[in-house]
């Protein structure tokens, strides 16, 4: 995690002819235009705008900072919450955002987003050690019906499924990230699991004994695109092809909310990439993730 530092002030991050500041409600239209430049890559912040209707900070305490040119036009932005998420950040803006991050009092679990911006910001931080740097994560997307038949047993989960679903979510997180999301307290993580269930963004197939055998969620949903996360098959059921039909079912559910369905995957996860390709996903970009 990033260490605490002095509070950030806008005057510390002003390249010649540019200004970096926190966004406010008055910047909402400009931020919407910015995320619209790439609705798939920017779906995380686009989903915030769709849910809250403002570029101002979220109730969670997260905020968005942006770089403006000399005419006051928003050129790029960066979400600062539990994670750092760049929005249309070119490499030459990275130092300014790194300065904001370095002088904030926040602790971040990760930086993720388009690879060039993510890795440039991390390089400019030149201090915090990362637990893992995933430099090339194919960003995949599809529009239209899946190429394989959806699994009819995959359904939207309900509040009654929480006690069965939550352990599967924890297992997926531990496999993917390398530590337990409930270590030191489970309240925040389980709140997020419940939130996704309440939103209708959580999907699962349950086995004969009631156990979760496949699951996935929509982590971000905007009017233009959704992003799938947390895809997981119970270990004893791997190799049975559940992910093909399962992902096809998730796509069908997601298309009711937004026309484009996306996700990003580790480049070394060849089996998952082959499965997504079979369902109909194609690479549209490259993400990177820095885990602290």
Image (spheres, grey):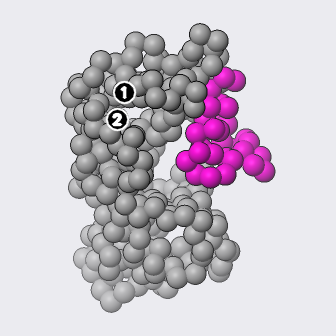
Residue 264 rendering spot, x and y as whole percentages: 38, 48
Residue contact at pointers 1 and 2, CB within 8 angstroms? yes
Q: In which quarter of the image is the C terminus?
A: bottom right
The residue shown at (53%, 25%) is 237
Q: Residue at x 30, y 72 (%)?
A: 90
Residue 212, picture quadrant = top right
Marker disc for residue 224 = none
Which secondary structure lies at badge 2?
A: helix
> Helix, strand or loop at disc 1?
helix
Q: Position of residue 219 (x, y in %)?
A: 47, 40
**In the drawing, what numbered circle is on residue 275?**
2
Front in this rendered view, residue 151 or 189: 151
Viewer can see residue 193: no
For marks 1 and 2, the one nearer the N-term is: 1
Quadrant into which the N terminus falls: bottom right
Closer-to-camera residue (212/191) = 212
Q: Residues within 10 Å of mark 2 (few under 14, many from 20)?
A: some
Relative vertical location of residue 265 with respect to residue 208 in this rendering, above or below: below
Q: Looking at the picture, tell me which residue is in the foreground, 69 or 189.
A: 189
Asked if residue 247 is among those painted magenta in the image, a careful observer would answer no
Q: Magenta residues?
A: 163-192
Residue 244 marker = 1
Magenta residues, dominant SS class: helix
* Location of residue 104 in the rendering, given as x and y in whole percent from the top left corner: 59, 73
Q: Which residue lies furthest to the right in this view?
A: 184
Furthest residue in direction left, as rendered = 144
Residue 248, picture quadrant:
top left
Q: Furthest-bottom residue in view?
A: 16
15 lies above or below 250:
below
Q: Is residue 98 above or below residue 151?
A: below
Quarter-of-image position of residue 260: top left
């Amino acid at each position: 995690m990033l260490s605490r530092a002095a509070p950030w002030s806008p005057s510390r991050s002003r390249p010649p002819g540019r200004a970096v500041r926190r966004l406010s409600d008055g910047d909402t239209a400009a931020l919407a235009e910015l995320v619209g430049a790439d609705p798939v890559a920017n779906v995380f912040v686009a989903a915030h705008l769709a849910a809250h209707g403002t570029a101002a900070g979220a109730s969670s305490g997260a905020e968005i900072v942006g770089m403006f040119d000399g005419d006051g036009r928003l050129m790029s932005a960066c979400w600062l919450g539990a994670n750092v998420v760049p929005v249309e950040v070119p490499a030459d803006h990275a130092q300014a955002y790194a300065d904001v991050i370095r002088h904030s009092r926040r602790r971040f679990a990760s930086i993720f987003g388009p690879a060039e911006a993510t890795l440039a910001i991390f390089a400019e931080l030149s201090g915090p050690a990362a637990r893992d740097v995933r430099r090339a994560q194919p960003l995949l997307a599809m529009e239209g019906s899946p190429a394989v038949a959806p699994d009819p047993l995959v359904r939207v989960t309900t509040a009654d499924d929480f006690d069965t679903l939550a352990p599967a979510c924890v297992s997926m997180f531990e496999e993917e990230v390398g530590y337990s999301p409930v270590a030191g307290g489970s309240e925040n993580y389980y709140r997020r699991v419940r939130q996704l269930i309440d939103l209708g963004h959580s999907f699962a197939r349950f086995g004969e004994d009631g156990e979760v055998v496949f699951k996935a969620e929509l982590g971000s949903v905007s009017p233009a695109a959704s992003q799938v996360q947390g895809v997981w098959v119970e270990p004893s059921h791997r190799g049975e092809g559940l992910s093909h039909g399962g992902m096809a079912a998730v796509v069908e559910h997601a298309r009711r909310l937004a026309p484009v369905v996306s996700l990003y995957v580790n480049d070394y996860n060849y089996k998952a990439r082959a499965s997504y390709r079979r369902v109909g996903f194609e690479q549209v970009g490259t993400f990177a993730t820095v885990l602290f």
